[in-house]
Amino acid sequence: MSNNNKPGVILMAEDDADDRLLAEEALSESQWKGDLRFVQNGEELLDYLFRRGQFAPPADAPRPGLILLDLNLPRKDGREALREIKADTILRRIPVIVLTTSKADTDIERLYELGANSFITKPAQFDALVDTMRALRHYWFKTVELPSPK
């Protein structure tokens, strides 16, 4: 199903409040009109996706069209969370973009092996982050065709 006219939901797993604020501002600057939601650790990410606990009502946890995943999350790190997401037959359809400070070749290789759809090192400058968010929005929500969220 085409989603070119749907702004969709982006779910960002990020424990740093400053990084969350910067991402929100960068998406706004990139003219993102969709719904940006945040979780602060790997367990919260999985609770949201599996609609458990505080996210049990489906209206409180709409399926994201895209997940932005930090690696170094508390309670369950991004690698473990990615492994569980890609092991689930429904959730594996959601593109997962690793957005992290890491540049380690071992991280890059391992995350692609686990099923990451992209690996992006967080830009240090705000203008570069806006450009990154604009490119993500354009590619994932305007260029490619994604399946309907389930």
Image (cartoon, rainbow, N blue to C red):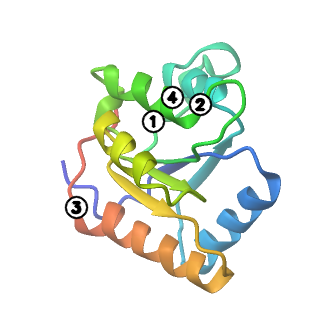
What residue is at 72 percent from the left and 67 percent from the top?
22
- Say what secondary structure mark 3 lies in: loop
Q: Which residue is mark 4?
A: 81
The residues bearing labels 2 and 1 have C-alpha atoms spaced at a distance of: 12 Å
Mark 3 or mark 4: which is in front?
4
The residue identified by callout 1 is: 63
Q: Position of residue 124 (x, y in %)?
A: 66, 75
Q: Name the residue tied to disc 3.
A: 144
First along the sequence among labels 1 and 3 = 1
Q: Residues within 10 Å of mark 2 (few under 14, many from 20)?
A: many
Q: Are marks 3 and 4 in contact (CB under 8 Å)?
A: no
Q: Earlier in the sequence, mark 1 or mark 4?
A: 1
Residue type indicated by callout 1? Arg
Residue 92 falls in image quadrant:
top left
Q: Secondary structure at mark 2?
A: helix
Which is nearer the N-term, disc 3 or disc 2?
2
Q: Which mark is residue 45?
A: 2
Q: Residue at x 49, y 33 (%)?
A: 79
